Image (spheres, rainbow, N blue to C red):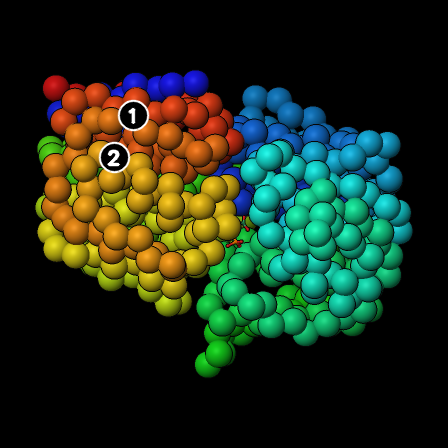
Amino acid sequence: MKQRVAPAKSLRGEIALPGDKSISHRATLIGSISQGISQIENYCPGEDCNRTIEAMRQLGVEIVLRGGKLRIYGRGLQGLSKSPAELYAGNSGTLMRLLAGILSGQPFESVLAGDQYLNRRPMKRIIEPLSLMGAEISGDKDQYPPLKIKGGRLRPICYHTPIPSAQVKSAILLAGLHADGQTTAVETAQSRDHTERMLRAGGAEIERQSTKQGYQVSIKGNPRLFGQNLSIPGDISSAAFFVVAAAIVPGSQVVMKDVGLNPTRYGLLEVLRRMEADIRVENQREQGGEPGGDLGVNFSPLQAVKVEGKMIPTLIDEIPVLAVAATQARGESVIRDAGDLRKKETDRIAALVTNLRKMGAVIEELADGMVIEGEHRLSGALVESFGDHRIAMALAVAALVAQGETTIDGWEWTLTSFPGFIEKLDSLRKG
Ligand code: S3P
């Protein structure tokens, strides 16, 4: 499906965002293996999180979804039952990798499959630690989905992840629930910590520590996990498109209510502030162990920036829209140490370079990032999502500051995380 996006004169108004996708996945997965009922509000309406509900239903969990509210009848750590059919993760790497951790502790065989994009994403990163714990896992060419998993009682391990990845860390921690003893994941830079926060809030014993080498987190096996009542904060990764849009479209003033502001996720805000963006955080609060608040962004001219190292995991999903911001910033912006972007829903580095060049940006491709020279006036073009929701939405933001109309092909992929994105964007257009 093609979506046409016209330039904007300015953006003004107040919006709310769909619930955080990462936290929504975890709420369903952890609620399903807890004891008792979990009630979840503001569940992410994207397709990825619906797949998680479907998968857990196939594993015998009763889940009722009504008007964005979820009621999960948890079955406890050992209460899942073998699915009669293969489990389908669709486009979702988070679902596949986290569920693999849970299935590694279940005494039956499961098959976990994905769509054409997910089936090309690397799974060795979870097969290795989960096999060390004792799960029997095989994949296509030993590293791609579909994954066949035969689980059981597991051994605790201490595992150093080769790249910081919340999906890998979470798979290990979820498997660690089924290990006799303490399981530890060590990262060179801290990735998002929603899993450890939610497990701790549900009753698991979690120890976490920032170290000279990075970050490490441990979980004690066989805890009693209890159902939780959670209100999921707005997704900062969805807010990111509006944050950058308001920062680069002259005259804009946009307020976003109830956005998740977990420090392991708000790297984009820090980087944009370094670029001299005008961003306010108000009404800060904490709910269900997750910090949040309201975000206000006004237009202001941006300066180039360099982003690398430990910063990268805190804004990994926001790099597509950060690259768009960099096309509108004065000077040369550099993004490095982000080679894992090539392993996301699509190769995001290649997708950005191809599309933004078509729109007139001056951008050099690096193996692990990009160099972007600003500020350049963009022009409308025919561009392509490559099956990636965040590429599609980042290009819609670029279209707002382009001369002439932009057409984005493969727009339907925005449903992965953000149904209603374009309507929300259009509701802010003024003038
Ligand atoms: C996610 C972790 C990140 C991120 C993805 C969601 C999660 O992946 O890119 O969109 O919910 O754990 P990695 O942990 O593999 O970097």
Picture quadrant of residue 352: top left
Q: Earlier in the sequence, mark 1 or mark 2?
A: 2
- Residue extending furthest bottom? 212
Coordinates of residue 354 in the picture (x, y in percent): 32, 40
Determine the secondary structure under disc 2.
helix
Left-right relation of 100 to 355: right
The correct choice, above or below, for 86 with respect to 362 in the image is: above
**Label 1 belongs to which residue?**
382
Q: CA separation, marks 1 and 2?
A: 8 Å
Coordinates of residue 386 in the picture (x, y in percent): 44, 34
Nearer to me, 42 or 324? 324
Q: Residue shown at 38%/59% (left/top)? A: 368
Q: Is residue 280 visible?
A: no
Q: Residue shown at 46%/23% (left/top)? A: 412
Q: Residue shown at 37%/48% (left/top)? A: 349
Left-right relation of 3 to 218: left
The tag on residue 307 is: none
Left-right relation of 303 to 146: left
Determine the secondary structure under disc 1.
strand
The correct choice, above or below, for 426 with respect to 374 in the image is: above
Circles 1 and 2: CB atoms closer than 8 Å:
yes
- Residue extending furthest front? 141
Coordinates of residue 276 in the picture (x, y in percent): 15, 53
Q: Quadrant of the N terminus?
A: top left
Q: Is mark 1 within 8 Å of ligand 1?
A: no
**Label 2 belongs to which residue?**
358
Coordinates of residue 265 in the picture (x, y in percent): 42, 53
Check disc 1 and give the amino acid type. Answer: Leu
Left-right relation of 61 to 344: right
Check disc 2 and give the amino acid type. Answer: Lys
